[in-house]
Amino acid sequence: MSNFDGDAASFTATVEEEPPDVPLSTNLLPILSAPGDPEATPALPLGPAPHRSSHLIASPRTPRGNPLTRAFRRRFFPEVTDQEWNDWRWQARNRIRTLGQIERILELSDVERAAMVEGGSMLPVGVTPYYMSLVSRTDPNQPLRRTVIPTTHEFTRKRGEADDPLGEDGHSPVPGLVHRYPDRVLLLVHDFCSTYCRYCTRSRVVGHGDIAPSEARLEKALDYIRRTPTIRDVLLSGGDPLALSEERLDWVLGRLRAIPHVEFVRLGTKMPAVLPQRITPQLCRVLRKYHPLWMSLHFIHPDECTPEAYRACSRLADAGIPLGSQTVLLAGVNDDVATMKELVHRLLMMRVRPYYLYQCDPISGSSHFRTPVEKGLEIIEGLRGHTTGYAVPTFVIDAPGGGGKIPLQPNYVVGRDGDFLVLRNYEHREFRYPDPLP
């Protein structure tokens, strides 16, 4: 438990201890510099909330970012230079983490403020200044705000929920490595994210410093991969692997690529959405050394598809990295056809292929985010045939207990009529396809 520096009193909540940026000669692989002293945080003046547009148009021709972010900077960070704002390390050091900082920016609801004061959630609070600029100052039900500001709903545990609903810990042969599928593994490089999503599947470990990016731990995981020739696919996650410096990421990717039977390397990241400044030319030069390399991005709402995110995805795509988006279906955030259609259209314009639509995992305290499974099927049916097939993700449930991803789709098979299969299309018209019985 750490003290939050508020305006009137101290409040307690769980926050993570971030590894310091130590020299390369040590055995700890650093992530980001430690956050600055909260007392040194730039003053956040109060005043009327800026006008908030419901749509942020992704365009590569906007040199200084979207209008919401520009207004936010003028109001809350007026002394910060363009060079500082666009420095991903500055963004990480100046993350908004305390009740005092949040209250200077947002008008908190009772359930939000109580959650910060009581600190009963498993997951720390942390939001980059950039991403906070996209959050509504006055509306606690705004989609992006719901996903990064805690509420007391997180304290309620419902039937079927669990701290580790996917059973990852039971499929971990060495610390920080999950081997659930025969030919692929999940390597957790660390447990740090620049912005914490309130519905995070790994909220039991993320942000608490339990998974350190030490060479000793990572070498144990790499040794397991070397000794298991059936592994051909490695997914780097955490935490966010792109929170590692270029030098450290180069170290990890280089050792993976030196293993002959590892054919396929993937990285899972939300950086293009929450910290697009991280996607630098230097980073892309490191990544492109290790093709074939694929990247799973995490976008959940059209308001994340800003000019900054557009540029970040363009840099990755120009580096030859195929991009797919893994979106979580969230109540009150993206659980309607219109919002999801706008999101997938914007993603395609950003050269990102909608890949998975996840039913929200039943982590402890997540019931306010979960929708009925039928809602996901309704959204897929509202996309299929009504837009390009490239825009339609696969709707999946990651089965509790380690069962893996199970795809779901609307039932387009009506039945049989003798030697014909009766099908229906997106317009609910029926068709007969010749399919003789043996």
Image (tube, grey):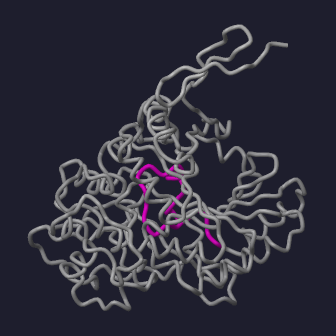
- What predominant SS class does the magenta segment belong to? loop
Chain part drawn in magenta: 192-213
Residue lying at 48% horizontally and 47% vertically, measured from the top left: 328
| Vertical order, 307 against 261 (above or below) | below
The location of residue 254, given as percent across then percent down, is 77, 77
| Vertical order, 129 against 165 (above or below) | below
Seen in the image, is 90 located left or right of residue 414?
left
The location of residue 14, given as percent across then percent down, is 39, 60
Q: Nearer the viewer, residue 245 or 36?
A: 245
Residue 202 in magenta stretch:
yes
The location of residue 279, given as percent across then percent down, is 52, 78
Residue lying at 46% horizontally and 76% vertically, measured from the top left: 311
Residue 276 in magenta stretch:
no
Q: Nearer the viewer, residue 284 or 42?
A: 284
Q: Nearer the viewer, residue 166 or 310?
A: 310
The location of residue 317, given as percent across then percent down, is 59, 72
Seen in the image, is 185 located left or right of residue 323?
right
Residue lying at 63% horizontally and 77% vertically, measured from the top left: 319
Q: Quadrant location of the C terminus? A: top right
